[in-house]
Amino acid sequence: MNKPTVNLFFDTRIQKKDGTYPVKLTLYFNGKKRRYNLNVDLLPSEWDKINSKNLRDEKLKGIKHELNSRIEDADESINKLHNFSFDSFEKLYFEDAIDKNNVFDAYKRYISKLTDEGRINTASSY
């Protein structure tokens, strides 16, 4: 079975009013692709700098780190799925992103993880 691949796409087809373009996550699987907006917009010069070897701009380093983190999160979501489908990926990937912004959901997830690992005493303390 083929494994889906993930990369970034600088979408120069859609220019925003401020001259920036969106960066999207592209997912390829069995000859099909889907793109997901990451809510990151860059100027072409910034995109070039992010992809260069000698990145010195601290702001752009932070953006590059965030983009790499999004790719890693997508790879983790793919690895969790036994039977990959775009719909199951979207549910898992975007559900994870939403839960990270809610402390109660984060606690519930962590407790569930501890329980699954058999760490009942630690889970009950949370």
Image (tube, grey):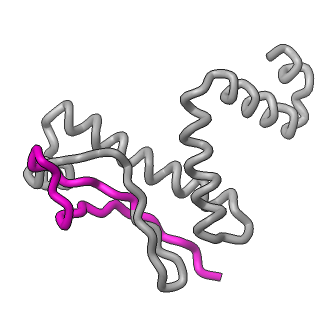
95 inside magenta stretch: no
Q: How far across and how far down the image is residue 56, in percent?
A: 13, 37
Question: Which residue is at 52% across, 55% downward?
Answer: 74
Which region of the structure is painted magenta?
A: 1-25
19 inside magenta stretch: yes
Q: Is residue 21 left or right of residue 4?
A: left
> 66 or 121: which is nearer to us?
66
Residue 111 versus residue 48 in the image, above or below: above
Q: Is residue 108 left or right of residue 78?
A: right
Q: Where's the N terminus, which quadrant?
A: bottom right
The residue most toward the front is 17
Question: Which residue is at 34% across, 60% downward?
Answer: 8
Question: Which residue is at 58% across, 58% downward?
Answer: 90
Tell me where residue 126 sits by quadrant: top right
Q: Is residue 116 left or right of residue 77?
A: right
Question: Which residue is at 46% across, 68% downward?
Answer: 27
Q: How far across and how far down the image is residue 64, in percent?
A: 29, 44
Residue 31 versus residue 45 in the image, above or below: below
Tell me where residue 26 sits by quadrant: bottom left
Q: How far across and how far down the image is residue 84, in percent?
A: 66, 70
Tell me where residue 13 sits by quadrant: bottom left
> 70 or 37: which is nearer to us?
37
Q: How many marks?
A: 0
Residue 16 versus residue 4 in the image, above or below: above
Q: Is residue 11 left or right of residue 90?
A: left
The residue most toward the bottom is 31
